[in-house]
Amino acid sequence: MSKTNAFKNILNSIKNTSPLVHNITNYVVMNNTANALLAVGASPVMAHAIEEVEDIVSISSSLVINMGTLSEKWIDAMLLAAKKAKTLNKPFVFDPVGVGASKYRSETAQRIINEATPDIIRGNASEIMALAQLTNSTKGVDSTVSSDTAVVAAEKLSKELNNTIVISGATDYIVTGNTIDEVTDGSALMPKVTGMGCTATSIIGACIAVEPNYHVAATVGMQIMGKAGNLAEKSAEGPGSFQIHFLDVLHQLK
Amino acid sequence: MSKTNAFKNILNSIKNTSPLVHNITNYVVMNNTANALLAVGASPVMAHAIEEVEDIVSISSSLVINMGTLSEKWIDAMLLAAKKAKTLNKPFVFDPVGVGASKYRSETAQRIINEATPDIIRGNASEIMALAQLTNSTKGVDSTVSSDTAVVAAEKLSKELNNTIVISGATDYIVTGNTIDEVTDGSALMPKVTGMGCTATSIIGACIAVEPNYHVAATVGMQIMGKAGNLAEKSAEGPGSFQIHFLDVLHQLK
Amino acid sequence: MSKTNAFKNILNSIKNTSPLVHNITNYVVMNNTANALLAVGASPVMAHAIEEVEDIVSISSSLVINMGTLSEKWIDAMLLAAKKAKTLNKPFVFDPVGVGASKYRSETAQRIINEATPDIIRGNASEIMALAQLTNSTKGVDSTVSSDTAVVAAEKLSKELNNTIVISGATDYIVTGNTIDEVTDGSALMPKVTGMGCTATSIIGACIAVEPNYHVAATVGMQIMGKAGNLAEKSAEGPGSFQIHFLDVLHQLK
């Protein structure tokens, strides 16, 4: 399948089948994430109660866990949902927001990865470095990490976990073992809008719901983000109007 | 009172008196809901702590409970607030988001209805069917429910609970016993924006705060949504700009 | 330092150093707050778990606590974070949302002030009056408080707490003991958008992170809000487009 075909096929497949994407995500971005999933053609469901996450995983096509705002009950629900996803062979994407910024976040990321290995992990360079360190693939976390260094860490991490690692940034790297793809589209306004990374993770959650090749799903997810960012910037006057155009473009994307 | 007069009177009344509308709602839509209430002229208050919900109900003109994101403490607060509203004869609107999608949601909806009957319930066709099934008014919940079938369920439910049931969709149905009104305004972009249903429920919460006839309040609430949706669509390029125009229009509505 | 210089210096300093501003804030405004901080050039972090707030305070340049939506665990985290900020001499801004509206809110505000005096408190006239009453600086809280009356209360409160009090409204008052500054910029659309006050508090949190004179930091924070509000209004058609322009303008501000 050519890359152009993968993009069109996955996008069409999302629009035609409206896969239900179960998100356990943070308070800051819930609204953006839900709107981005709706705009791209998927169907978002947000549910975090221990009492219902297993039911919701069961009816969903994929699971997205984002640890942006943590607390005990949420972590319990994340673990329960992730394990259910593994049991049911539902694809599971993980966003380790802020891993390395506090001991609590690092421990939580490690617990999730240990108890239910995510099929795809997406983070920025610092987060992927912090994760790789946790799993002993590398030592020392630099607060100003270059993407090159992070790619090496991602390769090791991907081989260790036998999954796909996405490093997002000015250039995005999609790493599955020795296979590395790059996406260079996007906009300098993206880091000026809260939760664009979280949105990327959920868009990957929509792609993985319809595409069994996780590397391809992750790559197309980042291509969708890049292309929408690129187009949205053209008519934006700042991060406010950028957000609005981004949703409009995502809805129009073909 | 003619229908046109009801619309103008209720809208003016909201703008002139700025009724305090107490919302216990979900994380995804809190911001939208608060902004929609402000735009239409009401005064929103969001409070969910068991320690204060009774105080807040006491100073508010109406109560809106939305079970979009559930957890134990929130359910306790919802029940406490709903019972306080009944005790004080404050109008109470309920949005059973996702009822039927998990056992937990179905049980919670049933508990709320049993312990404090809502004056108005608003949901989509599937949710109203699921509710009607819970209360034994009908049997079998179809995941792809036609509005016609849902209207029959709503009639039975309304008679059983002695209240008003609103089914929102391309055509909205407002059902109070045998009285059925329809609203056909709106926009195809509304289902592409998260929480438009939740916004409808809160706008009804503003109407019921100033209009003692609940059927009329619910009808005008849906007319406000429909008219604003209709006007917002005219200058929208997608679900992002639609949301922005929707708030602008709601603010300008006369 | 002239007032114009203070404005430019603080704004440049935020843009050049991107101070990390730790927010423990309410569900309704988290997204707006994070986006406003990003737009002005700061770096927001939202974290509320007891397990990590001390770690996050330690790596942040300032702390903002906003009690818009309360519950027990959040209050525990707020107290822990505030005490850690005092221990580490990190500047701490407090937004007593809705103090006076419920006993729970009044008690919580009092606990926070007693256990860790905020360097700056920002509220509307009613909230500042309610706070002043709690601390016995004045008696009786009027629900329709004139700003003049509130300024007298703010002076007493500021002297008692030896800090800076900001009253926001059509005219903003920044009060430090007998020193009172006024900001008259802004827009009539600001009260029609949820969380503009909360945004003001967080923008002050960015200013206090780079400016050791708290009175000056608070004044410039309100000037940034006023100027951005003023400019955003020029091209706004209502509260929806106002919000978008506000972020764009905040990003462009020099």
Image: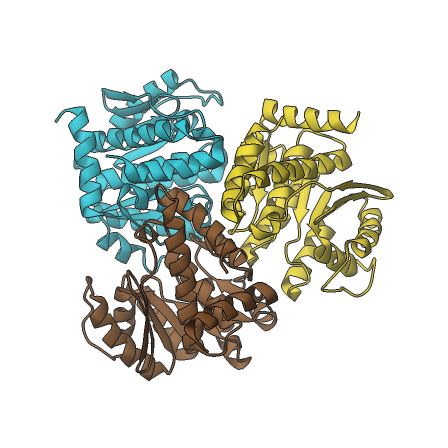
Chain colours: A cyan, B brown, C yellow
- Residue C214 position (above or below residue B86): above
The residue at the far left in this view is A1
- Residue C102 position (above or below residue C180): below
Q: Residue at x 63, y 63 (%)?
A: C104
- Residue B9 position (above or below residue B198): below
> From where the camera sits, is residue A48 visible?
no
Instruction: Tally the numbered discs.
Output: 0
Q: Position of residue A123 (x, y in %)?
A: 38, 31
Q: Position of residue A244 (x, y in %)?
A: 42, 39
Q: Residue at x 45, y 23 (%)?
A: A141
Q: Position of residue B68 (x, y in %)?
A: 38, 59
- B95 vs A230, nearest the viewer: A230
- B139 vs B106, nearest the viewer: B139
The quarter holding residue B47 reads bottom right
Q: Quadrant of the N terminus of chain A?
A: top left
Q: Position of residue B113 (x, y in %)?
A: 38, 76
Q: Is residue B212 left or right of residue C218?
A: left
Q: Residue at x 58, y 33 (%)?
A: C250
Q: Is residue C114 left or right of residue A224?
A: right
> From where the camera sits, is residue B92 visible?
yes
The quarter holding residue B41 reads bottom right
- Residue B179 position (above or below residue C205): below
Q: Is residue B206 left or right of residue B173?
A: right
- A116 vs A7, nearest the viewer: A7
Q: Quadrant of the C terminus of chain A?
A: top left
